[in-house]
Amino acid sequence: MKKTIGFIGSGNMGGAIIGGLVGSALVAPNQVIVSSQDNESLKALKEQHSIRIAADNRQVAAESDILFLAVKPNIYNVVIDEIKTAIKENVVVVTIAAGKSLSDIEERFGRKVKVVRAMPNTPALVGEGMTGICANEVVNVAELTDVKNIFDSFGRSEMVAEYMMDAVTGVSGSSPALVFMFIESLADGAVRGGMPRQQAYKFAAQAVLGSAKMVLETGKHPGELKDMVCSPGGTTIEAVAELEKNGFRSAVISAVQTTIEKSIAMSKPKEN
Ligand SMILES: NC(=O)C1=CN([C@@H]2O[C@H](COP(=O)(O)OP(=O)(O)OC[C@H]3O[C@@H](n4cnc5c(N)ncnc54)[C@H](O)[C@@H]3O)[C@@H](O)[C@H]2O)C=CC1
Ligand SMILES: O=C(O)[C@@H]1CCC=N1
């Protein structure tokens, strides 16, 4: 891809996308330009990936063909106000913020800019991201393909209708935090059984990785895969019964529901 890819914001998600993108070799490091308020993270990204650091947000806006807004949702209005007179005529703006709609972004720019709304996740950093994507009607197929290729370069992505973006936030944007809690809990269980902690994280994480791959690669229902582990009268069914007693699935469904509700609440107009 010949385009310049800009990032405003170099935190957890901006940094993960930059790391994944440069690691994929879809673009050369000098095609990536970044600005942020955090000089330490900028310095670290430059050292690690040889990307370019801009003097300010307006320089990134002026040079980018595809411009990622990777700041917190409550900073969006300030940043858009700052850059709206600096962007290229045909720039594709990519918003990754929870609860920011395509129309929120268009309205703040004050004109029908090309906007792609995406909800990625931090596993982008290790090439295993999952991203839901939608776009407004002025983004053409070639532009959308370029943006999708960026997200595909560090994992998988799927086009979704915009109304599904809150559910995407729950099931993949936020869910790595829940999975990390699950891995931590599995490891705590193993530590309780006498295993050294670092070794326990390795066993727990590999079990989760392998289980996820089985879902993706066998196409089997997760319940069927669960049944394959549960020997009659064996160890696993004891753990299944314990989790059911403690409302495990209900707790997870409610947790995802709360992220969806929060994402919807964040979409309500607020001034800042
Ligand atoms: N962290 C995650 O797992 C995910 C985050 N997101 C979205 O990504 C966006 C960023 O989130 P995080 O990376 O987690 O936040 P973060 O707090 O780690 O990073 C925010 C970045 O914005 C920079 N910044 C703050 N004010 C600025 C300004 N005025 N101009 C330029 N840069 C400025 C900060 O220096 C920092 O580099 C949010 O909108 C969030 O909803 C989406 C999916 C997953
Ligand atoms: O917690 C958040 O608001 C962001 C969006 C999805 C993951 N992190």
Image: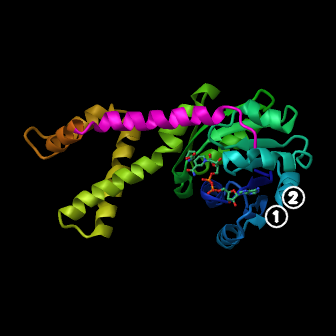
Q: Residue furthest front?
A: 271
User: Residue 148: in sight, yes or no?
Assistant: yes
Q: Name the residue nearer the viewer: 235 or 265.
A: 265
Q: Name the secondary structure under disc 1.
A: loop
User: Residue 133: in sight, yes or no?
Assistant: no
**Mark count:** 2
Image coordinates of residue 71 in percent, x first then y, are 69, 51
Residue drawn at (9%, 38%), measured in percent from left and top? Answer: 232
Q: Name the residue nearer the viewer: 207 or 98.
A: 98
The residue carrying mark 1 is: 54
Give amino acid for label 1.
Ala
Residue drawn at (87%, 58%), measured in percent from left and top? Answer: 59
The residue carrying mark 2 is: 59
**Image vertical order of residue 133 relative to residue 197, above or below:** above
Q: Which residues are magenta?
A: 246-272
**Badge 2 vs badge 1, beta-carbon distance below 8 Å:** yes
Residue 164 falls left or right of residue 199:
right
